[in-house]
């Protein structure tokens, strides 16, 4: 029998600062990320789409997640977590991501000093 996996990898930007809450099961940090997609159709028209994902962070990773600020680009890996709730007598299902891994993305260009140091060959010893 094969083993199926529930894994998700997302790259996006935080919509607002992460929010930490204390619960009887420990601290949890919640935030949302926007994953942007852009494409051009066959007629050359440009299209943009943004999907929002709700992220939950528990355990030791929550301390790092609590420091995340709005518009920070990040990578999140984790598991999709289905949840149900009832509103006006109707049961609804939503999905969030329980993060197992978070990493900030640095899109900044290297500065001239770091480029020139990296490009210079090492001096030969005499």
Image (cartoon, rainbow, N blue to C red):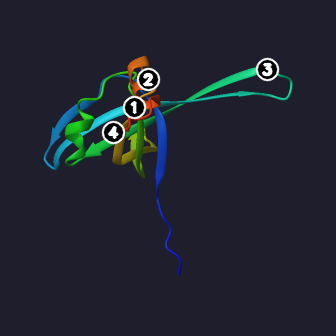
Find the distance from the CA under tag 3 to the CA under tag 2: 40 Å
Query: How many other residues sit within 10 Å of disc 2, few (<14), some (14-19) or many (≥20)?
Result: few
User: Are the two marked residues, 1 and 4, in contact with CB atoms closer than 8 angstroms?
Assistant: no
Quick check: marks 4 and 2 in contact, CB under 8 Å? Answer: no
Which image quadrant for residue 36?
A: top right
Against 90, residue 34 (above or below) is above
Q: Callout 3: 10 Å neighbours few (<14), some, many (20+)?
A: few
Mark 1 or mark 4, earlier in chain: 1
Q: Residues within 10 Å of mark 1 (few under 14, many from 20)?
A: many
Q: Residue at x 41, y 32 (%)?
A: 105
Q: How far apart are the two marked residues, 4 and 2, measured between alpha carbons?
A: 20 Å
Q: Is residue 95 visible?
A: yes
Q: Which badge, 1 or 2, is on the more N-terminal residue?
A: 1
Residue 113 horizontal/vertical position (percent):
39, 20
Q: Whole-Å distance between the Cαs marked 1 and 2?
A: 38 Å
Q: Which mark is residue 45?
A: 3
Q: 85 or 46: which is nearer to us?
A: 46
Rate crowding at label 4 as few (under 14), some (14 to 19) or many (20 or more) other CA atoms within 10 Å.
few
Q: Is residue 88 above or below residue 17?
A: below
Circles 4 and 3: CB atoms closer than 8 Å: no
The residue that mark 4 highlights is: 125
Residue 37, image x, y percentages: 61, 30
Residue 32, which numbered label? Answer: 1
Cα–Cα gap, marks 3 and 1: 29 Å
């Amino acid at each position: 029998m094969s083993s199926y996996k529930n894994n998700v990898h997302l790259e996006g930007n935080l919509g607002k600062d992460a929010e930490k809450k204390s619960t009887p099961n420990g601290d949890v940090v919640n935030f949302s990320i926007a994953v942007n997609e852009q494409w051009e159709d066959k007629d050359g028209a440009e299209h943009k789409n943004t999907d929002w994902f709700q992220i939950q962070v528990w355990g030791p990773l929550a301390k790092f997640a609590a420091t995340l600020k709005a518009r920070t680009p990040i990578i999140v890996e984790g598991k999709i977590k289905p949840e149900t709730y009832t509103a006006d007598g109707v049961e609804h299902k939503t999905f969030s991501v329980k993060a197992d891994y978070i990493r900030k993305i640095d899109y900044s260009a290297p500065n001239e000093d770091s480029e020139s140091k990296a490009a210079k060959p090492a001096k030969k010893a005499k």
